[in-house]
Image (spheres, helix red, strand yellow):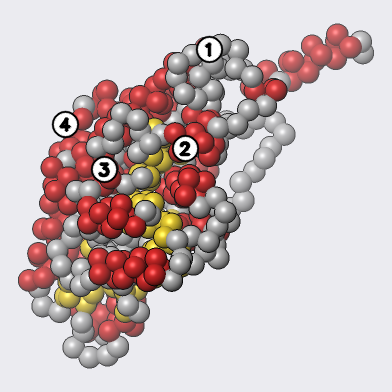
Amino acid sequence: MTDRARLEALAEAARPLEPDAGERASLMAAVHAHAERYLAALPEAPTYRTGAMNAPGFPDLPISIDKALGFVSDQVEQRGIATASGRFMGYIPGGGLFHSALGDFLADVSNKYAGFASAAPGAVRLENACVRWLADVVGYPAEAAGALTSGGSIANLSAIVAARDALDPDGGGAVYVAPTAHHCVDKALKIAGRGSAPRRMLALDANHRIALDSLEAALKQDRREGVRPWLVVASAGTVDTGSVDPLDSMADLCARYGAWMHVDGAYGGLFMLCPEGRAVLRGIERADTLAVDPHKTLFLPYGTGAVLARDGRNLRASFSATADYLTPFAALEDVSPADLSPELTRHFRALRLWLPIQLAGLDAFRAAQSEKIGLARYMHARLSELRGWETAAPPDLSVFAFRYRPANGDIDAFNERLTKRLQDEGRVFMSSTRIYGRLHLRAAILSFRTHLEHVDAAIDALQHAAQALEAE
């Protein structure tokens, strides 16, 4: 076989990678029908399912789209937690907006590289516009900058690296953090080479927020003993209880002692879009850096976070880099996202954020956020009135912890069994955590599909499960 004939044969063998218009239409019709069946069944589907798992295949020759989608349905969609359900209230719910799926489809088809402005000026301009809008939502000034990330872990890491380079390049600075901080903060400190930095564990107040006197005492003692205050980590919505630290007062202390204030607002920071959230989050705009997750509070699919810096020059100083093979081939005004974050190769994430806002409008997002906060406060009040349920202070945002106190027996063991029973029944999914060593359930209400009837059903499921366990 000649070289030409061989190349032509290889092209023919690779042709399944390039379906024609008719094939594309058939594939789209099958996927659309599959998605519609899934969404139609979702309202009544169990929130958690187990079952035997089969290994995915990797065939040498094509299989039908129906067979492939059958595997996805049986082995992926029908297994584990139904995070797209309105009755999913465990962990921090993601969203899965249909509008975002359309954005991802368009981004994948065009495959625009969103790292450098010269490679995809429109894609980069759209991402920068989305970041600028996020900065406006939280109240950041014009000189702020940031980048879309895969989630809160990379956003927090990016912020901590920027804080390191700006205020602690040689190490030795102290870190001030609460026991309620997300574990990704500890991971980020290790990755940034500050895992062994002097660590001050701060006390909490009765509502599980950082106690200001504890922070001030730690800052004073370090200054007195010659230890330089470096990084104060606050939470705009903790994982366990959804509590928001006293951000404005903490910013005052950071300014007084010259410390960098970072806010992990992955869960709650973007509640600044609605009036109830702004009332709780006052002071977030004073943070030096901020992590937010649109895949939480803006209901987008998982994989959509953002790092924001009040002074964007700090991110650029930490992450801007060049190489001979990366020389831009066009001079543009837009800053490249690759110069503001660790990622060089970047998915075009901006469409999954921008398109839903265009198609639904910001008022719908504001209303949904206000509804989630209202639902959490409603559920907290209902449980507080029912016999046997222990609740702490009303939720700051849309997450709170609670537990059941049985008439007899170990309280922690009972609530552990209660959590498992609730999950196995599949009517509603909630998770558990430990607060001061005591086991609690968590209600995390943040799905755009969660409404009053789902919360009422969750309360009924909790009551039924607790009563059944007590009767055993």
Left or right of 124 on screen, residue 55: right
Distance CA(mark 2)–CA(mark 4): 31 Å
**Whole-percent x, y for residue 445 in the image:** 24, 53
Q: Amino acid at mark 3?
A: Glu
Which quarter of the figure is the N terminus placed in?
Answer: top right
Q: Which dot, 4 or 1, sits closer to the camera?
A: 1
Q: Is residue 244 visible?
A: no
Pointer 2: what residue?
315
Q: Are marks 4 and 3 in contact (CB under 8 Å)?
A: no
Q: Is residue 253 left or right of residue 170?
A: left
Is residue 262 at least partly visible in the picture?
Answer: yes
Residue behind mark 3:
285
Q: Earlier along the polypeptide chain: callout 4 or callout 3?
A: 3
Look at mark 4 in the image and give the residue it sits on.
Answer: 363
* Residue 195 picture quarter: bottom right
Instruction: Measure how far apart labels 4 and 3 are at the Cα level.
Output: 22 Å
Where residue 174 appears, as percent x and y from the top left, is 45, 63
Q: Quadrant of residue 171?
A: bottom right
Marked residue nearer the N-terminal end (1 or 3): 3
In primary-sequence order, the first of circles 1 and 2 is: 2
Q: CA distance from mark 1 to mark 3?
A: 32 Å
